[in-house]
Amino acid sequence: MKKSLSILLAFVMFCSMILQFDNVVYAGEVPSNVITNIRLEDESGGAIYNIKQWQAMKVIMAFKLLDNEIHEGDTTTITLPKELLFVDVPIKFDVKDSNGKVVAIAKADHNKKTITLTYTDYPQSHSGVTGTLFFYSRIDHEKEKEKKTITLDFKVGNEIINGGSVEWEGPGQANGQFMEKASWKSSTNNNGISYGVFINRKGQDIKNGWLEDELQTEKTKYIENSLKVYKGSWQWNSNISDYQLKNERLVTNEVSVIWGQDGRSFKLNFGDLKPSEGLRVNYKVKIGYIPVDGEIFKNKANLKGQKIEEVERTNSYKYFAAGGQAEGYVYKIQIKKKGEDSGNPLPGATFDVIRVRSGQTVGTITSTTDGTGELGGLLLDDYKLVETEAPKGYQKLKDPIFVKPEDFGTNKIALKNIVNKEKEKEKITVTVTKKWENPDGTPLTGDKPTISLQLLKDGQSEGNPVELTNGNTTHEWKNLDKTDKYGNDHKYSVQEVGETGYNIKLGNDWYKVTYGADQQNGLTVTNKKKTPWTPMEPPTRDLKVTKFWKDKDNNDLNAPVEKIEVELYKDGAATGNKKELTKANNWTAEFKKLPVSATLGGENHNYTVKETGESGNAIQLNNKWYEVIYGGTMKDGLIVTNKEKNSWTPMVPPTRDIRVTKVWQNDSGTEIVPSVDEITVELYQDGKTTGKTLKLTSANNWAATFEKLPVSATLGGKNYEYTIKEVGVNGEKIELAGTWYRVSYGGTMVDGFVITNEKEVKPEKPDKPDKPDKPDKPNKPNGPTPPGGTTPSNGPTPSNGPTPPSATTPPDNPTQLENSTQTDKATKLNHSSKEKKTTLLKKIAQSGRHLPKTGDGANPAVYALALFALGSLLTVVGYRRRKNVN
């Protein structure tokens, strides 16, 4: 029985083991290919190339989980390259897919420099799971001591995946400052920041030193009991590439600290420091919410003291998280403003953009002419838009517009279409009161004339004028629009009909019209009666002018002439009004009844005079020169003094003559007969036409002179630059009597100008070449020529033979070729020396600069000459062959 029971129990246990084995899946390391790509970015999301000590870089790993191959509890282990350390990576964090679902729990081991992913059950029930894993790291500068290129190879499972390379600039060197500041994530609080302020690494005397510190990000506060102050001596430690405070001791109780009432600032008085003494101030700050990855917190510190300049440092702490799908400050909110009824874009709306998490206003958005506006550089978070200013003519929104993380699309933009209602048209009433006054300002009694008033809206007439009769002094315009369609207030005013220059004539009386008050308090129009003697036209004045004569020593001088003339100028412009000053009128005259101003109460005219004939304050009278001096005033009279000048002083600018010569030639430079008998040349002064012309003709040998041209405008002034131009020239060419000439200019003002007209020759249409004649056979030589004998008359001349007949002697004068035939030219050229060939070739070219006719080279004489020479050569060759054979 016991044996049977044992067998039964053994069977049951075996079955249980079989059943359990069928249902258990053992957890293990998943294949390494779940990580598909690794890339590096800087803190702002840009590409990273060079990296410095302490600089953090973001490691981003893209993953894709294999369907049906990953189970709950499976793991993937990622090992950092030996050159890297983790930066602010939490011990444990979630890894999410592209839909925000947690697919694995990551655990970081800072000592082993590994991250182990333990997968949840999510991959078992979902396919196509993808996403990104990110964390922050930096170069381990305590181990990497040299500047170099570092290749970053990450180990994923058993495989190596390359993450690129960076240029490591090497660890820093000792460069002590009066104050430096650092920040890092608090080790005791995930939403806390630790700060360190390092004072007097520079090593100098500081007297009565103060440290002032202020938080600049909303919802952050100091943890006051975390403030610690240490005193010691700063020394550079090359092993860790950083400063260390040696022989430090806690001196928090020896300094004075004053905290700000809002808990967001403090002042610390640390007294005096010797060059060998330094401080380290440590404190912590609490963030009033859980930050998101990449969020920046700013803190400003100032160091003050005697014997040092004030030092300011702003520290920007960036919150580093780890996980998936975080992007940093790359999001943007856009708005589009429209009118509710019209649908038209609305410019001028302004919104405060407030981050809900921190309550901080991170920026503003203002709509432009197309109704759009935007604000970028935002984190993925909740925001609210509060309208602070509505478009003109529209009501401001009462409630904020909320923006949620899910509102941001794949382009990282959240677009909000916002409409505004138009303001209701507000109506106003404008009143006007008419007042009448005597010249002394007292109220005018008795009957008043009827007047009309015109209402103006924004300077333009609005409606018809209203009439105020005797005894009626007020009027109201009701139901007027307060604003235009854009919400701008209309400006209402009033004008008395018939008023000009604030004056009006009613009946036989003149009134001064003034306008007062405003549309809110009521408009006023006051007519103040003018006294009868008040001139209604601008007053006039008389202006006396006196002439004095002085010699060069400023003594009185007898006038050299019987009279001179002066012209009146008003505000610098000649009036044409002239007076004669003569011996008979004691050199005095008067301009009478000159208007003082253009209008009543207008700006006074300024009257002056000028002596007729005077130029540059000088005048010539009876061949003597006088300096003209003006003085006096309009009130006391103007004075014109003529003072004798030294006779040797030149009083007029010198003059010059400019000669112009015309040259006619062909394109080879040979003088030709012109096709016309005359041409016209125009003179230019400083590039501008003077209107002066000269005729150059065959009768005056194609030369003429511009005479007595002023060298300059004034004595000692800048000299004029004279040039000429042939009348009729178009560009550089001119057509004269059917012939075209190229016109060029040469010469100078001193030596005279030369105008060259070069005749242009158009190429003739080439003739059709004639068919060459068949060459004659060369004559058979009569026999061999004995050595040293003569060559037959029809054979070639040997190099040591007799001189050719005179008919073939090259001409000494190359001009003989001009009338030669092509055959003659070729023959003469062939028998010329090397030196003469050059001259002959030039002369041949000059004998006909025009292009040769097509077929000229096929002249029968040339062919005959060529064939004759060829035949002669063949005959000599054949003769010599036969001689050698014999």
Image (cartoon, helix red, strand yellow):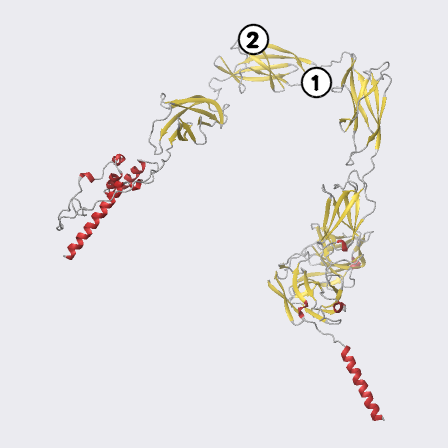
669 versus 362 height, above or below? above
- Residue assigned mark 2: 582
Residue 240 showing in the rendered view: no
The structure residue drawn at horizontal position 73% and vertical position 14%, both measured from the top left corner, is 536
The structure residue drawn at horizontal position 63% and vertical position 20%, both measured from the top left corner, is 571
The structure residue drawn at horizontal position 21% and vertical position 49%, both measured from the top left corner, is 873
Q: Which mark is residue 628?
A: none
The quarter in which the N terminus is drawn is: bottom right
Residue 202: x percent and y percent?
67, 56
> Distance of mark 2 from mark 1, alpha carbons?
35 Å
| Local SS, label 2 | strand
The quarter in which the C terminus is drawn is: bottom left
- Residue assigned mark 1: 599
Determine the image quadrant of residue 66: bottom right
706 versus 64 height, above or below? above
Q: Earlier in the sequence, mark 2 or mark 1?
A: 2
Is residue 52 or residue 409 the one in the foreground? 409
Name the mark nearer the viewer: 2 or 1: 1
487 versus 683 height, above or below? below
Give amino acid for label 2. Thr
Residue 253: x percent and y percent?
80, 59
Is residue 47 or residue 583 the one in the foreground? 47
Is residue 749 or residue 616 the one in the foreground? 749
| Local SS, label 1 | loop
Give amino acid for label 1. Thr
Q: Residues within 10 Å of mark 2 (few under 14, many from 20)?
A: some
